[in-house]
Image (cartoon, rainbow, N blue to C red):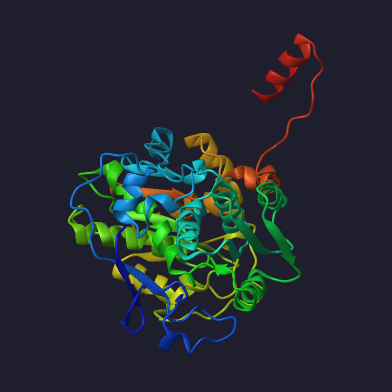
Amino acid sequence: MNNFQLRCHECGATYPEDAARLTCPSCSAHQQPGGPTRGVLEVLLDTLPDRWPKAPASSAEFLTAFLPVAAEHLAPLAVGGTPLLGVPELRRQLEMPQLWLKDDTRNPSGSTKDRASLLVVAKARQYGYDTIAAASTGNAATALAAVAAASGDRAVVFVPKAAPEAKLVQMLAYGARVFPVNGSYDDAFELCLAACDELGWYNRNTALNPFTIEGKKTAALEIAASLAPECPDVVLVTTGDGVIISGVAKGFADLEHAGLIAKRPRLIAVQPAGSNAIVDALHRGEDNITPISGAASVADSLVVEAPRNALLCLKQIRASRGGGVTVSDDAIVAAIPRLARHTGVFAEPAAAAVLAGLDAALGVQLLDRDERVVLLVTGSGLKDVATAARSIDRPSPIQPRLESLIERLEASS
């Protein structure tokens, strides 16, 4: 297993591995209830490989080369190793010959959140915990439930009562103990904090647990490995709490440090107009965010009033020389069938929003059409079929006669 230290991104203090340490004690003393997490810690590995492992990206050999985990603690679940697609039809439509799509809908629970849960559950097992808890808008909860089921551990999740039905059914089917909260994701997050402190559960909460960021970096490792010896110029990531994009940044930073890529790509955060605290801070040139009271969007996975990983996320986007764009709910809904028809990938609103974000980024010249651009598609459309249904015209039934078929074909031609 890779040895490592934990470093506070705010004050730079480093700490040895400690099962009980989730944040920097000095900086977390300034934590405000409901505000961004203070004292977020990043994992600093003692060693990184100087060449790509020959094993598949979802294998224990690959994961243990880049992550602070021993193979025996990993759940027997094939997380990661998702394809990087060349999407020729979308390339033609957008006149972007080097456009790529990272299809993370193919993870076991249908979401990129599986990457974080795989590492968090492994570390919980290493530390002797048998119960792992998380607050989630839905995908992190289903990811934790899936990985915990495979490893034989207990998952406890707190979700807003408005979480999509498909996600609730999924996490319950995996056997998680589910607590719908009469409130927002932010309310669920605070309740999870209190429950873990009182009941001694291991806390998977996004950003608070440093292994959520570390686990999500594997998406960047796979993108780089697929394109090697080239590297993306730009990667677009839909953003809620800011942990996925921070994980992607961490992955590319590790690869640059190891000499496996020449330079990190620019990162572009995509947020819905009703929940855009991070992009708003980027545009205002601020190092902190202004919470969005009553945050709302059709992209439920991106809805958060005060993004928990905002401080680190802002720092990393700027360090990459990237930026951020805001997209409307109408643009998000329209992107669902457009993405599906031009790539064969059916995405939930929070994932399809990345295509709407690409349109917006082109519109404000955050990237050029001839650059090597990757869209990270984070979750399956099967998680929210009701919203996808709003974007399509459902045909009425025809009679089981050839004449009826001909009439319908002629009417639609």
- Split into 4 quadrants, where in the image is the N terminus? bottom left
Residue 157, image x, y percentages: 65, 62
Residue 284 as seen in the image, left or right of residue 405: left
Q: Residue at x 50, y 41 (%)?
A: 106
Residue 139, image x, y percentages: 59, 55
Residue 363: tell me if it is visible: no
Q: Residue furthest front?
A: 128
Q: Residue at x 44, y 51 (%)?
A: 74
Residue 132: tell me if it is visible: yes
Q: Residue at x 63, y 42 (%)?
A: 382
- Split into 4 quadrants, where in the image is the C terminus? top right
The residue closer to the viewer here, 159 or 211, is 211
> In this rendering, is residue 275 above or below 345?
below
The residue closer to the viewer here, 37 or 66, is 66
Residue 130 as seen in the image, left or right of residue 248: right
The residue closer to the viewer here, 307 or 389, is 307
> In this rendering, is residue 319 above or below 215?
below
The residue closer to the viewer here, 60 or 135, is 60
Residue 180, image x, y percentages: 73, 63
